[in-house]
Image: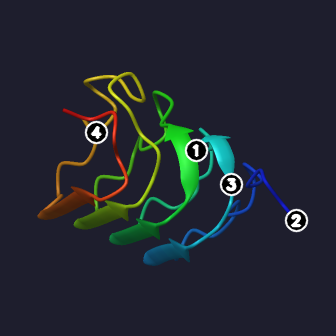
Amino acid sequence: SVSVLPEDLLQGKRELLQFSMWSNKFTGAVPQGLFRDTKKLERMMLYANDWDEIPDGTFKGLTKLEIMSWAGCNFGDDSFSDDVFDDLISLQFFDFIDGNPGLT
């Protein structure tokens, strides 16, 4: 089985509006360059993945993202920096629940 999501998976997908992933066993960090070419992305839903870190720059340039929903991931207190979401200026809905035992 695949445990690491390729960083170039979405390379060249400039018209992508929604990215959804459910119940995968990807471990470690969200690939930093995964969303590099998806500047038109409006919706991101990631449920029940085993990632435990969001590197700085992961969401850089996603200024059109309106909906972000994460549930059942393994994030803890040190999983991301305070400014990792700074570029998400259009964000209207942010859901970050379930399975995050380290967050207080």
Residue 86: which quarter of the image?
Answer: top left
Instruction: Please identify, in this view, whether the residue under mark 1 or under mark 4 is nearer the observer.
Output: 1
Find the distance from the CA under tag 2 to the CA under tag 4. Answer: 30 Å
**Which element is circle 4 on?**
loop
Label 1 close to label 4 by CB (< 8 Å): no
Find the distance from the CA under tag 1 to the CA under tag 4. Answer: 14 Å
Q: In the rendered view of the protein, which quadrant contains the N terminus? A: bottom right
Q: Which mark is residue 1?
A: 2
Label 1 close to label 2 by CB (< 8 Å): no
Residue at the far right in the pictured view: 1
Q: Give above or below for 63 relative to 67.
A: above
At 64% from the left edge and 67% from the top edge, which residue is drawn? 24
Q: Residues within 10 Å of mark 1 (few under 14, many from 20)?
A: many
Q: Which residue is mark 4?
A: 85
- The image shows residue 98 at horizontal and vertical percentages of 30, 59
**Which element is circle 1 on?**
loop
User: What amino acid type should be assigned to the residue bearing mark 2?
Assistant: Ser
Q: Which residue is mark 3?
A: 26
Instruction: Please identify, in this view, whether the residue under mark 3 or under mark 4 is nearer the observer.
Output: 3
Residue at the far left in the pictured view: 92
**Residue 36 visible in the displayed image:** no
- The image shows residue 81 at horizontal and vertical percentages of 34, 23
User: What amino acid type should be assigned to the residue bearing mark 1?
Assistant: Val
Find the distance from the CA under tag 1 to the CA under tag 2. Answer: 17 Å
31 sits left or right of 102 in the view: right
Q: How is the image coloured?
A: rainbow
Q: Which residue is mark 1?
A: 30
